Amino acid sequence: MLFLAIETSPILAKLLSPKSAYDFRLEDQETAIKTNVLQNKNQREALLKTDNIINDRIYSDIEKEDELYTYKRKKVRELMQLQADAFFKHQKNAF
């Protein structure tokens, strides 16, 4: 019992004593760190939301461009022709 009383007395004394300057400074530091983390989190979320909105606008504008569509169509046609030629050559060499 004596050992238990000796070990718990500092804890009981701290709980019963009024808050000191140290307690206020510790609380101030803890809340400052918490506030900083929350601000950074909110900024990252706002940045992500803004980036998504900008990307959606950009891609919707690109989607409406006929010039880009015709350019991609031309390139895909060339690619398909090259694939067909390569397949024909491969089949021709097989016999």
Image (cartoon, rainbow, N blue to C red):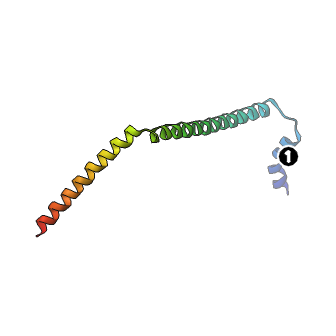
Give the side of residue 60 with respect to residue 93, left or right: right
Residue 23 appears left or right of 66: right
Between 72 and 1, the one nearer to me in the picture: 72
Residue at 11 percent of width and 65 percent of height: 93
Which image quarter holds the N terminus? bottom right
Pointer 1 residue: 12
In the image, is residue 2 above or below residue 94?
Answer: above
| Residue that appears at 85% across and 52% down | 5
- Residue 73 position, x and y percent, is 33, 46
Query: Quick one: label 1, few (<14), some, or many (20+) residues within 10 Å?
Result: few
Q: Nearer the viewer, residue 23 or 82?
A: 82
Q: Is residue 80 above or below residue 21?
A: below
Q: Is the C terminus in the top left, top right, bottom left or bottom right quadrant?
A: bottom left
Query: Tag 1: residue type?
Result: Leu
Dot 1: element: helix
**What is the x, y in percent for residue 75?**
29, 46
Q: How many marks?
A: 1
* Res. 13 image quadrant: top right
